[in-house]
Image: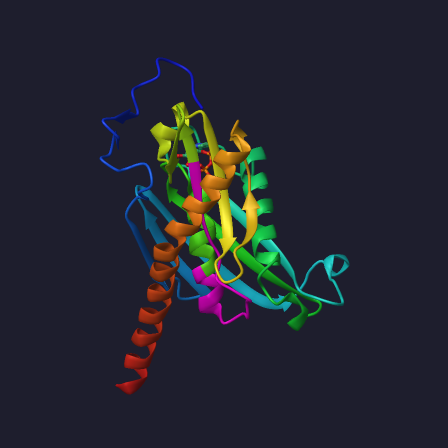
């Protein structure tokens, strides 16, 4: 939600990039892109470009962070210095990246079968190469594919997307300019098998009815997002099995 003169974001029912309110941006995911990661994925979602990598499970260190009952997840989301026009020259975590790392970690704590790896840590890295609004949702969606590709058992493969409000219209998957001038932004992560909400944040005001409607929009869009995630996994396995055939 930025300052300055607010541009008209919806004209004749269409958004500035031609989408309808319920239409997400084009989505592409590729699994198995980082050779040294146990699982990895690259996502292009609109103009966002993000890589997620999973390492472990391995002995949790330092030892005092170990949980004898289950694995712990360490998550580090970061934007590269060249990922947007805003200044990212300063290296190291900031308040926003620490927050996004925390909420992302919590999403995966709810689906990864942590009890199978007591005393271990699972490291999840999310690197934003290019940002255009909605990077936490895109990062979670990519990380879910990376986690699945790692073979670490999960109860489900989550996805995330954000719903915004422009005037009184709910819009799915806002880009940066929409995000800057929107009246509300609500990123949501869902476990599609159970319908459980794994993340729900809200910036701005939405009525109870708008929240209910927004969650429905996310669930509906999720059918296609989950399909793209599964397709990415499937084609990475096909590539591996082709390699072993030779
Ligand atoms: O990325 P997401 O929408 O999850 O988080 P946000 O904090 O609402 O940021 C919205 C967008 O603003 C990001 O996707 C980036 O395009 C941009 N942004 C940036 O370029 N640099 C920052 N330090 C923060 C945000």
Residue 190 appears anywhere in the view: yes
Which image quarter holds the N terminus?
top left
* Residue name at image x 43 percent, y 28 percent: 87
Quadrant location of the C terminus in the rendered image = bottom left
Across and down, in percent, residue 241 comes to 32, 80
Q: Give the magenta-colored segment's residue range.
A: 145-163
Name above or below for residue 149 compared with residue 185.
Answer: below
* Residue furthest top as drawn: 5
**Above or below — where is 116 with respect to 111?**
below
Give residue 182's position: percent from left, percent from top.
41, 26
**Residue depicted at x 42% and y 47%:** 138
Q: Nearer the viewer, residue 228 or 60?
A: 228
Q: Residue furthest bottom?
A: 245
Q: Along the horizontal axis of the image, is 226 left or right of 245?
A: right
Q: Along the line of sight, which residue is nearer the eye, 43 or 203?
A: 203
Residue 163, image quadrant: top left
Q: Is residue 24 magenta?
A: no
Q: Is residue 158 covered in magenta?
A: yes
* Vertical placement of residue 1 versus 60, above or below: above
- Could you say where residue 201 lies in the image, as x and y percent from the top left? 55, 38
**Residue situated in front as seen by the camera: 195 or 120:** 195
> Eyeballing the image, is 224 above or below 211?
below
* Residue 169: % across, % down: 38, 29
Q: How many marks on residues?
A: 0
Seen in the image, is 164 located left or right of residue 47?
A: right
Q: Quadrant of ligand 1?
A: top left
């Amino acid at each position: 939600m930025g300052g300055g003169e607010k541009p008209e974001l919806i004209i004749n029912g269409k958004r500035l990039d031609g989408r309808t309110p319920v239409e997400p941006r084009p989505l592409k995911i590729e699994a198995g892109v980082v050779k040294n990661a146990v699982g990895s994925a690259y996502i292009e979602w609109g103009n966002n470009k993000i890589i997620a990598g999973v390492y472990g499970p391995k002995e949790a260190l330092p030892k005092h962070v170990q949980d004898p009952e289950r694995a712990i997840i360490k998550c580090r989301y970061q934007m590269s210095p060249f990922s947007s026009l805003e200044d990212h020259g300063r290296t190291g975590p900031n308040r926003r990246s620490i927050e996004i790392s925390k909420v992302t970690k919590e999403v995966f704590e709810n689906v990864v079968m942590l009890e199978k790896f007591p005393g271990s840590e699972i490291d999840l890295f999310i690197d934003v190469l290019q940002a255009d609004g909605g990077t936490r949702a895109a990062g979670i969606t990519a990380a879910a594919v990376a986690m699945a590709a790692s073979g670490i058992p999960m109860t489900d493969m989550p996805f995330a997307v954000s719903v915004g409000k422009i005037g009184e219209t709910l819009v799915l998957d806002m880009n940066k300019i929409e995000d800057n001038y929107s009246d509300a932004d609500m990123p949501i992560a869902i476990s599609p098998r159970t319908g459980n909400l794994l993340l729900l944040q809200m910036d701005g005001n939405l009525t109870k009815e708008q929240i209910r409607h927004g969650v429905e929009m996310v669930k509906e869009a999720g059918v296609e997002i989950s399909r793209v995630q599964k397709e990415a996994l499937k084609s990475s396995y096909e590539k591996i099995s082709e390699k072993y055939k030779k």
